[in-house]
Image (cartoon, grey):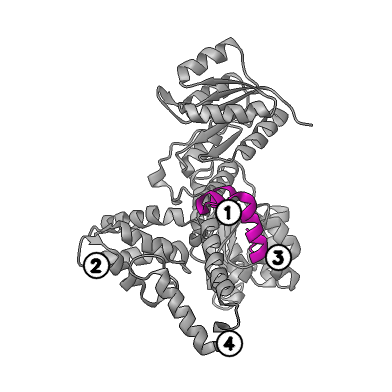
Amino acid sequence: MSRTGRILVLDDDAAIRTVVGQALKRDGHRVLTAATIAEAEVQLATALPDVLISDVKLPDGNGLDLVERIVLAHPGLPVIVLSAQNTLTTAVRSTEVGAFDYLPKPFDLDALSRTVQSALSRGSGGIAEPIEAEDRALPLIGRSPAMQDVYRIIARVVSNDLTVLVSGESGTGKELVARAIHDLGPRRRSPFIALNMAAIPRDLIEAELFGHERGAFTGAQARSAGRFEQAAGGTLFLDEIGDMPMEAQTRLLRVLQSGEFTTVGGARTIRADVRIVAATNRELAQLVAGGQFREDLFYRLNVVPVMLPALRARRQDVALLARHFLDRAAEDGLPRKQLDTDAIAVLEAYDWPGNVRELENMMRRVAVLARDERIDADEVRATLGGAMPSVALVGDIGIDAAIRARIDRLAIEEPAALDDGTLYDRIIAEVERPLIEALLARHGQNQVRTARALGINRNTLRKRLDVLGIDP
């Protein structure tokens, strides 16, 4: 059964106060509003609400400073933070000051309603030790809805030692997630040790992980500490965990279960004081089903799953990332370059099979090779070369040319298709599918925003998704 309560909404945007207020009133809540921290403090001094909803950037100060004071004074008051500053720092800082939840703007009203219900039912979260960190010092960059989900998970796990499994395509930044979890958590002053399972010979993995004693095997002329010992007190990042041999999986499982290990050839038990973050670009569940990965180890590693989106699913971040990589290239001594608007459009239209790593490498390449300070669309196309998508909707390669090329190809491959009456539906479907898929990706799979961008209503979009067999 839904609970109702007294909700205080603090936001300097009158439109947001009105929309949020009306939505909450429809849910049966009593809603009070404030435009400044001073107004909110007056209302808080009069009577505490059941839930406080606060913006971050306010005319008379930072809303998170108010949240910190309120949660310290009233630990039972749940606070929901709203912010247009959609960065990892904001998400982490919200958790640190004790906010119940963090919602990036623009947010879905249904999601806000569910969060308010959850806050009324469960109360506020705890207060973590404050961390001073600037966005530019953090490894993860992006403000897309897809990255907001990643930030929220990171914000909730940095203060504990739960095992995290990061999944995603190659080049999406899985090690950066592991480093962020380490750098923002209580173990940040201890070592961060990374080990790539795919890069180590199978017969040496156990020695790499747990170390070995002198004489344990041929060539072991001295005792060597393994990565578990080297990472003591810190974080051990196990990359490409899906490539770990079965025998090493068994020993790793034993360590995760008991918290202790012995070196290869040793008898002394050593305590494993590390946080484990594992990563893979493979489907571990499929490996488990095929008998290539231990099911019990999978569940031990998959305590907190983090799925990193491909770059094509967060195209809003391409321009931000590209400029960041150009700036970093300049800091490394390469010529400083800037991107034209049409160049950014080409970058955003590309599918980036190599993800963020490919984009970074390309930006360093154009920093070296581009003659002019400003990089235009032609320069980007030349650098991308044959990797450009077959249908480009930017620059001088128009959709009309792509359609003519498609018809010419059909005339060669399926000449009957030009006369059997199916051509219109075929071409429209071939254009409609990538259009809808591209906009779903651009809007973080949010159907409401996608329908609005297409100029159709949500029901029509849902019907087209069913007809085209698109699963968002």
Q: Give the Cα separation between the discs numbered 4 and 2.
A: 47 Å
Q: Which of 438 and 257 is in front in this view?
A: 438
Of labels 4 and 1, the one closer to you: 4
Image side of residue 351 versus residue 152, left or right: left
If you read the primary sequence from the N terminus, does the residue marked by circle 2 or circle 3 appear first?
Answer: 3
Q: What amino acid is labelled 1 in the image?
A: Gln
Residue at the (71%, 25%) spot, across then down: 4
Q: What stretch is highlighted in magenta?
A: 448-472
What residue sits right under mark 4 in the picture? 416
Residue 266: image location, x then y, percent: 65, 64
Q: Is residue 234 visible?
A: no
Q: What residue type is labelled 2?
A: Ala
User: What distance separates the C-alpha of mark 2 from that of mark 3?
Assistant: 45 Å
Q: Position of 195 compared to 249: left or right?
A: left
Structural distance between the alpha carbons of marks 3 and 1 = 24 Å
Residue at mark 1 to residue at mark 2: CA–CA distance: 36 Å
Q: What amino acid type should be assigned to the residue bearing mark 4?
A: Ala
The residue under label 3 is 285
Identify which residue is drawn at 56% across, 38% down.
103
Task: Look at label 3 and name its amino acid.
Answer: Ala
Q: What element carries label 2?
A: loop
Q: Which of marks 4 and 3 is in front?
A: 4
Q: Of the two numbered discs 4 and 3 on the same chain, state the one appearing first in sequence.
A: 3
In the structure shown, which secondary structural element does the residue marked by tag 1 occupy? loop
Verify CB contact (< 8 Å) between mark 4 and mark 2. Answer: no
Q: Does 457 appear in magenta?
A: yes
The residue singled out by tag 2 in the image is: 370
- Disc on res. 445: 1
